[in-house]
Amino acid sequence: MSLAVEIEPLPLTTDNAGSVRVGGTRVTLDTVVEAFNEGLTAEEIAQQYPVLELGDVYAVIGYYLHHREHVREYLQEREQSASEIRARIEDELPRAGFRERLLARRREQQS
């Protein structure tokens, strides 16, 4: 009997916002790589995120191990983008006095 060797497509897709997601789920590549780098096994990651197929988790980890530099660049770009968004939000909605403004708004609505 011969073994039929087939190339499986990588279970990664990029959504409209540029996030890479795993196996048609909302779980991101970032999430799986971070969990793996924290020491979780593929089985533990699949248990933590039951929507993921174990084979997809292994495939993503394999991809990461073969393409570490590209994945790290992607993750750094995502972190930079998130930092810029956080800074913009904090500029538009300063935290200083936020609680007081909410309480004042509540008092106005109650009166």
Image: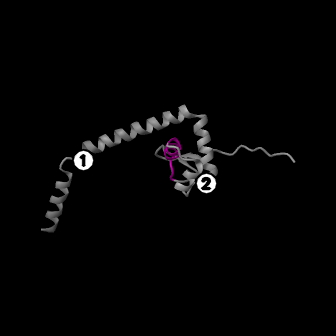
Percent position (x, y) of residue 108?
A: 14, 63
Q: Check disc 2 and give the amino acid type.
A: Glu
Percent position (x, y) of residue 102?
A: 20, 57
Query: Dot 2, crowdedness within 10 Å: few (<14), some or many (≥20)?
Result: some
| Drawn side of residue 31 relative to residue 5, left or right | left
**Residue under numbered circle 1:** 93
Instruction: Look at 66% across and 45% down and name the residue there.
Output: 9
Instruction: Look at 59% across and 48% down and name the residue there.
Output: 42
Quadrant in which the C terminus is drawn: bottom left
Give the residue at the far front of this rendering.
39
| Drawn side of residue 83 relative to residue 99, left or right | right
**Residue under numbered circle 2:** 53
Q: Secondary structure at mark 2?
A: loop
Instruction: Look at 61% across and 35% down and name the residue there.
Output: 66
Query: Dot 1, crowdedness within 10 Å: few (<14), some or many (≥20)?
Result: few
Residue 94 in the image: above or below residue 65: below
Instruction: Look at 35% across and 42% down and name the residue there.
Output: 85
Percent position (x, y) of residue 110?
A: 15, 68
Dot in front, 1 or 2: 2
Give the magenta part as a residue range: 26-37
